[in-house]
Image (cartoon, helix red, strand yellow):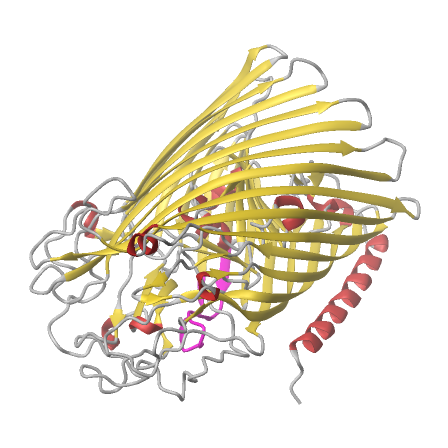
Amino acid sequence: MRLRPNTLSSVSIGALTAAMLSTAALAQTAAPSDDGIALEEIVVTSRRASERLQDVPLAITAQSGALLAERGVADLQGVSRYTPGLQFKDFVTSFNGSATLRGLAQSNVQNAVGNVGVFIDGVYLQRGYMVNTSLGDWDRIEVVKGPQSALYGANTFSGAINYVTKAPTNEFAGNLLVTAGSADKSAQVAVGGPIIDGILSGRVFIAKSSYDGTWNNKLPGVSGKYKKFGASERDAWSGALRFTPTDKLTINGYYSEVNRTEYLRPYYEVDGTFVEDRTNCGVPNAVNPQGSMFCGTLPVNPASLRSGVGTPPKGLFAAEQPPAISSTKLIKISADYQMNETFGLHYLFGSARGQAIEDFSFFSNTYNPTGKTTISQQHEGGKLAYASHDLRLSFEPADSPFKGDIGYFHSEAKDQFLFGIRLVAPGVALTRLSTNPLSRTGIIAYNRYDANYDVNAVFARGSFKFLEDRATISAEGRYSKTDVSFNDILGRAAVTTRPILTNSFKDFTPRVTAEYKLSGVNMLYASAAKGVKAGGFNGYVAGTTVLTTAEQTFDQESNWTYEVGSKNTFRGGSLIFNASAFYVDWTNKQQGSTPSGYDINNVVLGATPPSIYRSIGNATAYGVEVDGMWRPIHQLQLTGSANWTHAEYADGSISPNYAGVCDNVICPRSGDISGKQLEGSPSFSAAVGAQYKDVLVGDWNYFAGVDVTYQNKQYQDTMNLVSIAAYTLVDGRLGIDNGQWKAFVWGKNLLDEDYIQNAFTVLSLRQYAPSFGEKRTLGMTVSASF
């Protein structure tokens, strides 16, 4: 007998709860630690207030800026390695960054709203090309799992990532960090302190990095940055002010700019319409009699996918072409006024502006990409302007078991987007035609729109403590109204009577949490929360197919997430162990589909079936997460975390019908994907680490650390036909420090494993483009605090 998902979830949650209870009960008899080996407390602001991480009834991973620097983490892909359950992908060119938590991957990576909200100090970054901010003056990065719509809004459908910057203080302080490695070099410096003693302080930060890449480009004749894949140039700077005219009022201001130039990541392509490529399943065509699709695990070495026609370079290769470029500017102004001992007034203004351009080619002839054939060069460009206001009144009387707050939120965003191709004649260089992301000069435009998002919301939350403050019940909720207008510029130009499309999406998103403290350092909790993501528009046409009125828009999607967990501190603070189990019911999933006006029974071989998005899918996800830290002796600290998630499409879910490409055996004509695993996320991932530190001489200490991360196989398509293999990465470091100076040598991917990090898969086009993680790199970092 096969257990249904909800039955399995009940069994796993029940077993985990029993384990939590027994483990927490042992805490009261556990032996205290020796003096000096208690772990450092971590403070987070995930609930808009400073709280000890161990006191927050949420599954949160927080990594300090210092730890990120030691691990050499440069972006969200690095953060995800040490956050089991989190995946971040921006494919070959970095334009469409997409984060996934607990297996809830989105189908439409071009959507202006993602499933995971990304913030800097609570200010929302709406577009995928803005979220991977890389360099910054970070105090820490917090990853909050589960929907946070009640507190942050509809853009935190499955969780939130918040970059927390270092605030100015009234003491002069600064830090310097310089890195030189086999593939990269970077430098960053920050200085801050009092401007008017006790009243005004400031801090400035500047950083720059250059990366050469680790994979050789085997195409003859390439030069400069094109000799290797994955090169990048990044720079950032920020300034912050803190104004405290009275003991009751604090005003903070922050401005930052991040600029990125990203060259092609290491990748290869296999295409079922190329005579040079060998595919192995689906409907045969003239050049691939064995089938025009690929089924199986994408190989690290593409040689097995070559048909033998022609003489391709051995390894990975691509012609010189423009890098992806992006720029993001952010402003934050916050004011906190403590009216009296009970009431506080809090205001947050945020502004984020970004733009990006991608010009990229999947070559029509991979063996001779600049030679005899016409090349199709993809162009993607976008601009985003976002502004928000958040006003909140807090109520927290000193002697009352009740506390809470109430507030109002408003935001406006204008998202402009262009997608099309440029046909490049034989022998013509692949160049960028314009630095304006929205310029259509020389472009065959497939999609060009301006979308406006206007959000108004009211929210409130409250908590009540009882049983001598051991038990707490809290509830929070947000009522949101999102007005979306969509100017389908191309569709309206074809028929001038077509109006701008508009729609309003309204919803109430609650969260209810119960927590019980078995002791001062051991807690059980349970929660239920709703997440929503606003709907959107497909426009008037898809390709040349005119859409029906119902197909022009897609509805919002939602999920209910149920979670139980336990947070525990043992042995006098030297051991932390946290665990949680969750179940997610995802409804109205925005899923790719084929327009009703497209005749799927008369597909012309080589034509591209138009795809739209409809709210027609359902899915479930359930799993278990654990994390912990242990300092058994003063010199040694151990860390570990793991996530197991089973996420699958529910009964009745469908995917685009690949008629003329996929046969009925592996792709049912109905498009039914019920029971298929959600693509884009592994079912298991883990991270373990150890660091040893002891006295070297005088004030100097030496330290050595190692981190091992693992993720298992993951599917890359809705039909579960294509996957990438599991991989394990090992990083290490060895250094000295005296509390002010630190110097260490480091190595990433020490075992030099070749692995595919993610893949861009379009079954309807018979295209598969896996992109690789970096090879082994070695280097040295020196930092100073003053």
Residue at x 14% of width, y 48% of height: 223
Asked if the stretch drawn in magenta spans residue 714, the answer is yes
In this rendered view, identify the residue nearer to me: 733 or 522. 522
Viewer-side residue, 135 vs 482: 482
Quadrant assignment for the N terminus: bottom right
Give whichever of 140, 485 is nearer the camera: 485
717 relative to 52, above or below? below
Q: Residue 767 location in percent, x, y?
A: 29, 70
Side (left or right) of 249 relative to 659:
right
Horizontal relation, residue 296 to residue 151: left or right: left
Residue 172 in view, yes or no = no
For image coordinates 93% across by 45% down, the residue present is 468
Q: Where in the figure is residue 657, as x and y percent of width and height?
A: 40, 77
* Furthest residue toward top: 196
Identify which residue is drawn at 74% across, 27% down. Answer: 344
Magenta-drawn segment: 707-728
Position of 171 relative to 560 (above/below)? above
Q: Nearer the viewer, residue 54 or 747?
A: 54
Q: Name the image quarter holding residue 391.
A: top right
User: Is 381 covered by the magenta stretch?
Assistant: no
Question: In the current view of this chain or complex, which residue is farthest to the right?
Answer: 467
Q: Residue at x 50, y 48 (%)?
A: 484
State left or right for residue 587 relative to residue 453: right
Whether residue 629 can be seen here:
yes
Residue 779 place in picture, x, y as percent:
36, 43
Where is 342 relative to 448, above or below?
above
Circle count? 0
Hey, which residue is sitting farthest front in the picture?
497
Q: Is residue 622 above or below residue 92?
A: below
